[in-house]
Image (cartoon, rainbow, N blue to C red):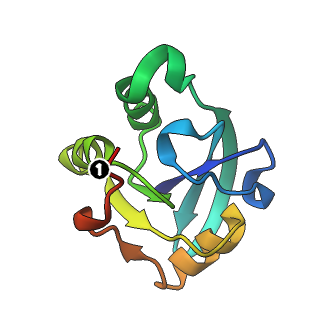
Amino acid sequence: MRVIIPVESEQGLAAPRSGHFGHAAYFTIATIENGEVTSVETIKNVDHDQFGCGGVIDFALSQNVDAIIATGMGMPPYSRFTAAGVAVYAERETPLAGDVLAKFIAGEVAPMDPNAACRH
């Protein structure tokens, strides 16, 4: 399983998480096999101002991920991810990517409630 987490720096699992999916500077992508992280990569996100929300969504989807864990997301990205078969999870309390990934592996991160999507 490949999981993408919006983050603010290139620090991989030590990166601070981004407060909103579309404006994240980077994505940390972790591969999980049998409940263990087997690889981690960090990629620079496309510029939201240049490519718009749709461009950011397309870029994230191009990474062949199975799930995304975000602190916040609007309905357009939520709808596009779920339509593409990507599970969307919300976790707003844990500041570092690695810690939220550990919670996810432990089953402590819930799927995002679409009623909680950002409205802007």
Q: Residue at x 43, y 67 (%)?
A: 90
Q: Residue at x 43, y 47 (%)?
A: 65
- Hey, which quadrant is residue 80 in on the image? top left
Q: Amino acid at mark 1?
A: Tyr
Image: 65 above or below 117: above
Q: Residue at x 50, y 71 (%)?
A: 91
1, above or below 49, in the image: below
- Is 86 placed above or below 97 here? above
- Residue that label 1 marks: 78
Q: Secondary structure at mark 1?
A: helix
- Residue 54 occupies which quadrant of the picture? top left
Is residue 1 at least partly visible in the picture? no
* Observer able to see residue 19: yes
Residue 105 vs 83, above or below: the answer is: below
Closer-to-camera residue (48/106): 48
Q: Give percent across and percent down for residue 70.
A: 49, 58
Q: Quadrant of residue 47?
A: top right
Q: Is residue 55 left or right of residue 99?
A: left
Q: Position of residue 31 (x, y in %)?
A: 56, 56
Left or right? Give the position of 19 relative to 81.
right
